Image (cartoon, rainbow, N blue to C red):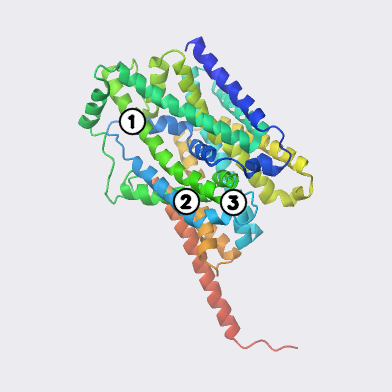
């Protein structure tokens, strides 16, 4: 790489830390630090929502889906399900978060079931979020290791330390405004890569379009009922809607953004608009993948590309102009940091508010609570560094399995929230039993069946809900029978 590219990356890393310190200055309490004083504009929250759900793996893997042999646009079916799920969140879940002054999603479960359910749900979130994002950090660092030829641990530490710093200094305001900038950077990186490829092809856009038609890469819909295929219309709409209900309706990382809005209407606008932006974003990345396939057919790389999600990285290093390559690599950093910063901030919020009463943190001064929150941010950052470094000892397949397990909680938590919304007879004991049954069911679906991954959230949600409801019905029958029996004589 040219020294100018390294300068571009360095300026970006310094810039995000400076911005975090500047926008977060003067915060005195947790409402300011964790929720931006509930005053963030809807369009900034929109950018933050989209950036947070886009990781480095997404930035590089989505183009690979269209680049690979037989690849096409069917992934957009899942994006349509994501948009549908957001509509359901607005109708069924979002209103509950604006009843009172809440800090975490799981306070809703406390009101409906009790503290044990709240803490169990929060614990599931903390374990899954930090395991999953620690592994995502490893995957992001692995990409940078291959692109920059730096030692893998240094890549892990470099991404983490910068993310911890601007999250620590600026809190939620820093996370949201940096997310917006990072969204612009990685979208610009994708657009620039697409433009460079098209300009270098002799036939330009016409050549790309003809290549896509000839190779069948413009196929978008697959109406087969195949439970083992992840890219069908039904897996996309149903599985994608359930997945979005879980990730955007019950995950503290997203709910914290809604609670930072000026009002309920702003949260609705940000969430619904994010569904449309995500569809456009994935269409862009898939278009980059089609152009990559056409470009490498015309200008084959010196060495055969072993993994399809490495194709864009190879193009950036080999063929992007000086300076533009640095900006595109900064986009890789941006995609990683937008997810990790949100993870650190939301994990600190969940631990402090859902478990803080155990340590009597609700009785200390606002300034000390902010200090505690900053300390927890650093602690979770170090935890994710440890998970990422430990992941380097395992094969990629084990890492991917662990990432899938980390996503299981979305369906289980969705089942708990559905119990709170749609039932009245289910109590805390039945809800916790449902949680255990849902965890077992989704684990079986992953490891003992060929079921495609978009259906895992459906399995988790339905089994958690169904098992808890059946237990509640059974307990009701037992209680009625007991009340019908003659009472024991009193002495």
Instruction: Give the answer, above or below, for where 388 lies relative to 447.
Output: above
Q: Which numbered tag is attached to residue 105?
A: 3
Q: Residue at x 27, y 48 (%)?
A: 223
Q: Which secondary structure, mark 2?
A: helix
Q: Position of residue 270 (x, y in %)?
A: 50, 44
Q: Position of residue 384 (x, y in %)?
A: 60, 35
Q: Position of residue 486 (x, y in %)?
A: 62, 88
Badge 2: few (under 14), some or many (20 or more) residues near its Cα, within 10 Å?
many
Q: Residue at x 50, y 17 (%)?
A: 149
Q: Is residue 121 visible?
A: yes
Mark 3 / mark 1, whichever is N-terminal: 3
Q: Nearer the viewer, residue 334 or 280?
A: 280
Name which quarter of the figure residue 26 lies in.
top right
Q: Nearer the viewer, residue 159 or 209?
A: 209
Mark 2 / mark 1, whichever is N-terminal: 2
Q: Which numbered tag is attached to residue 287?
A: 1
Q: Is residue 267 left or right of residue 283?
A: right
| Separation of residues labelled 2 and 3 (CA atoms) | 13 Å
Disc 2 target residue? 245
Residue lying at the far right of the rendered structure: 364
Q: Which secondary structure, mark 3?
A: loop
Mark 2 / mark 3, whichever is N-terminal: 3
Q: Residue at x 57, y 18 (%)?
A: 11
């Amino acid at each position: 790489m040219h020294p100018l590219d390294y300068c571009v990356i360095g300026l970006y890393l310094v810039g995000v830390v400076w911005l975090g310190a500047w926008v977060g200055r003067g915060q005195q309490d947790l409402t300011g630090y964790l929720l931006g004083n509930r005053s963030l504009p809807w369009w900034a929250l929109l950018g933050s929502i989209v950036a947070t759900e886009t990781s480095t793996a997404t930035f590089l893997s989505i183009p690979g889906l269209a680049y690979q042999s037989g690849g096409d646009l069917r992934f957009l079916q899942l994006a349509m399900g994501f948009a549908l799920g957001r509509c359901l969140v607005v109708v069924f879940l979002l209103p509950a978060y604006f009843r009172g002054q809440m800090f975490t999603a799981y306070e809703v479960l406390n009101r409906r079931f009790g503290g044990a359910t709240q803490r169990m749900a929060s614990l599931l979130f903390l374990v899954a979020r930090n395991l999953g994002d620690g592994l995502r950090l490893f995957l992001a660092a692995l990409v940078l290791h291959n692109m920059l030829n730096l030692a893998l641990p240094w890549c892990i530490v470099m991404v983490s330390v910068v993310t911890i710093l601007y999250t620590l200094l600026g809190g939620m305001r820093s996370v949201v405004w940096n997310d917006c900038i990072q969204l612009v950077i990685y979208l610009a990186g994708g657009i620039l890569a697409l433009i460079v490829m098209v300009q270098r092809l002799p036939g330009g856009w016409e050549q790309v379009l003809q290549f896509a038609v000839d190779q069948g890469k413009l196929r978008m819909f697959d109406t087969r009922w195949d439970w083992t295929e992840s890219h069908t219309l039904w897996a996309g709409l149903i599985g994608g809607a359930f997945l979005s209900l879980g990730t955007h309706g019950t995950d503290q990382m997203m709910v914290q953004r809604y609670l930072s809005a000026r009002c309920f209407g702003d949260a609705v606008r940000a969430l619904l608009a994010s569904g449309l932006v995500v569809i456009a974003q994935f269409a862009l990345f898939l278009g980059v993948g089609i152009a990559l396939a056409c470009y490498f057919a015309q200008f084959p790389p010196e060495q055969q590309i072993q993994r399809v999600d490495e194709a864009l990285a190879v193009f950036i290093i080999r063929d992007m102009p000086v300076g533009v390559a640095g900006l595109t690599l900064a986009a890789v950093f941006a995609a990683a940091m937008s997810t990790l910063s949100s993870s650190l901030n939301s994990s600190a919020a969940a631990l402090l508010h859902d478990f803080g009463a155990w340590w009597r943190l609700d009785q200390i001064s606002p300034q000390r609570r902010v200090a505690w929150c900053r300390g927890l941010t650093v602690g979770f950052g170090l935890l994710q560094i440890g998970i990422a470094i430990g992941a380097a000892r395992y094969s990629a397949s084990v890492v991917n399995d662990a990432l899938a397990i980390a996503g299981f909680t979305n369906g289980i938590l969705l089942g708990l929230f559905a119990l709170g919304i749609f039932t009245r007879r289910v109590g805390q004991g039945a809800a916790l039993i449902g949680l255990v049954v849902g965890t077992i069911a989704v684990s079986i679906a992953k490891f003992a069946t060929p079921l495609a991954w978009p259906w895992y959230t459906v399995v988790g949600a339905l089994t958690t809900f169904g098992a808890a409801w059946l237990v509640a019905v059974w307990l009701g029958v037992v209680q009625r029978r007991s009340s019908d029996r003659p009472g024991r004589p009193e002495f």
